[in-house]
Image (tube, rainbow, N blue to C red):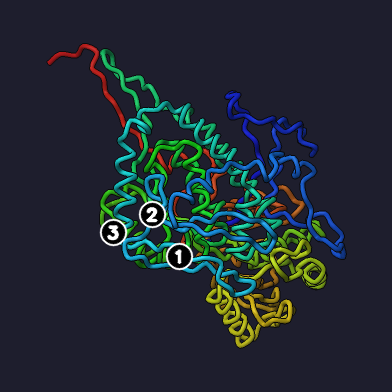
Amino acid sequence: MLSSPPLRLRIARNSSSLAKPLLSTCSFPCRSRFCDTPLIRQRHLNLDPHAKRPRQRHPAARRFFSSTPHHRQSNIVNNIAAMSDLSVELTAPNGVKYTQPTGLFINNEFVKSAKGELIDSIDPATEEKIASVQAAEVEDIDNAVKAAHAALRHESWKGISATDRGALMYKLADLIEQHKETLATIDAWDNGKTYADALEIDLSECVTVIRYYAGWADKTYGQTITSIPQKFAYTLRQPIGVVAQVIPWNYPLSMATWKLGPALACGNTVVLKAAEQTPLSILYLGTLIKEAGFPPGVVNFVNGLGRVAGGALVSHPLVDKVAFTGSTATARAIMGEAAKTLKNITLETGGKSPLLVFGDADLEQAVKWSHMGIMSNQGQICTATSRILVQEDIYDEFIPKFLETLKATSKVGSQWDKDTYQGPQVSKVQFERVLEYIDIGKNEGATLAAGGEPLNIGGKGKGFFVAPTVFTNVTTSMRVWGEEIFGPVVVIARFKTEEEAIALANNSQYGLGAAVFTQNVERAHRVASEIEAGMVWVNSTQDSDPRVPFGGVKQSGIGRELGEAGLEAYSQIKAVHVNMGTRL
């Protein structure tokens, strides 16, 4: 699942009612008017491994966030909640108080599910319930899809200009920025990721992605095509229609914006289902969708069990496209269901991404990046570089440096602690899955170099905490080598030659991401070309960019998100032939 996203970019806007001041020139060497330096999941890249707080931030990072004080946030949340009993007043462990919607967001209103079934949201650090939300049944999914279908054809959406559509998206981005502390609090509480990362990385990314695609809304053109005399042809780029979007639990809001951004920019309508483990933040986002001014039915958010709500959504006859991020196994089932009605699909699925460290690499940087590439976000990243391949002449030097960085950096603790690098796994199921794979690695004969056990944080015996784990002397026949664990577990192997490194890297059913560390430019390009992956980083990892396509090959997915390619996934081309005088 991910993949890790990141992006710190502001788009210039001309609308005085929506615009905020642009960032000043980037303080990094690029000196760009816009801040183009990717920051995704960069936690400690230029720090001494013994530093107390191993977290590096871009010099402009603080300026990425709105200066709007928390107390000036709009009252829309409270106003909507007051209209029904589908909300609950909550106070998070960090002291943030807010109104949490709990209904299904359909036609710009929160409604109860048909059967009144509920899903509990659990704090993975304490195992205590946060809130319960309505769980959609087949009837509720039908209502949401029909609302989206009606909105697609209504003049309030179909009839507005592309520029006005972009203006709505800019307004939504502004509202997300204004409510960023609350949204980050919800994701940290619901998911277990650190509040610092949720605020400074995830929410910044959400704002960036929506603004990026808002800028594209009136720039998706057709073509005029030269034909024969007395005839010309042109194309129209049109929305696909009603889009079903299913997002994962590792980056709830980030993944939502990755899918909402291009879908809305192209004029589609959406029914988005959140992961049942993290149902809360998407409902709060629904209040902002309404406040931004989107017409009823354009964006609908539902929670529910995958086998019930998810199945009903992807099989609905009025759904024209399905976009899914999650496990490969679930993607196969979705693909089979979508094939019955030939729906357009985009799938971003599993990974077991390799990171290659050649003998000429900058070893200090390779160690820091490789640690961040697997251990950030509790290892719950679909592009996590969970297989590290090190050339044998530096292998014995790399291992102790990696373990030293792990010990100095990967502090496991509460998601609210400023010094925490790794919070709890998202759920008991995921916690037990990670521990099961650790036992498998031990039984297969891999060398356990670090971690390998659950942790008791705070002495209460609660929470889904796992020690960051390192296996060395791993062979390709081991399950921990080939299967996605989706947790803070890395396997490290050695290679002799470039050819062997490429063969080992490609020895996987997956092909999402890969990273190469070398100071030889020719080798970098050569290896990047040969690795079977949708994305290859050279001398970095996880620093994606909203303008660059993201996606995998092999069993890691179909299609691309982000960048201009993301628009292609949500639009279709119609050809128009015009006869200028030919007579029969």
Distance of label 1 from label 2 (alpha carbons): 32 Å
Give the left or right position of residue 511, taking residue 396 as reference: left
Mark 2 is on which residue type?
Val
Q: Secondary structure at mark 3?
A: helix
Number of residues whose C-alpha sits closer than 10 Å to that of mark 1, classed few (under 14), some (14–19) or many (20 or more): many
Q: Amino acid at mark 1?
A: Thr
Q: State the residue at coordinates (66%, 73%).
A: 491
364 with respect to 376 (left or right): right
Callout 2 secondary element: strand
List x then y, in percent, for residue 454.
67, 81
Image quarter of the C terminus: top left
Please state if 226 lies on the left or on the right of 89 as rendered. Answer: left
The residue depicted at 65 percent of the width and 41 percent of the height is 72
Amino acid tagged 3 = Glu
Residue 75 lies in quadrant: top right
Instruction: Report, in whole angstroms, how far the alpha carbon at label 3 lies from the one at label 1.
Output: 27 Å
Spatial distance from mark 2 to mark 3, Cα to Cα? 13 Å
The residue tagged 2 is 111
Q: Give SS at disc 1.
A: helix
Residue 150 visible from this viewpoint: yes
Give how far across and how far down residue 529 sits, in percent: 59, 51
Residue at mark 1: 328
Kindly identify which residue carries mark 3.
139
With respect to residue 14, does 186 lie above or below? Answer: below
Mark 2 / mark 3, whichever is N-terminal: 2
**Which residue sits at x=80%, y=37%?**
27
Which residue appears at 61% of the width and 85% of the height? 439
- Mark 3 vs mark 1: give the one in front: 3
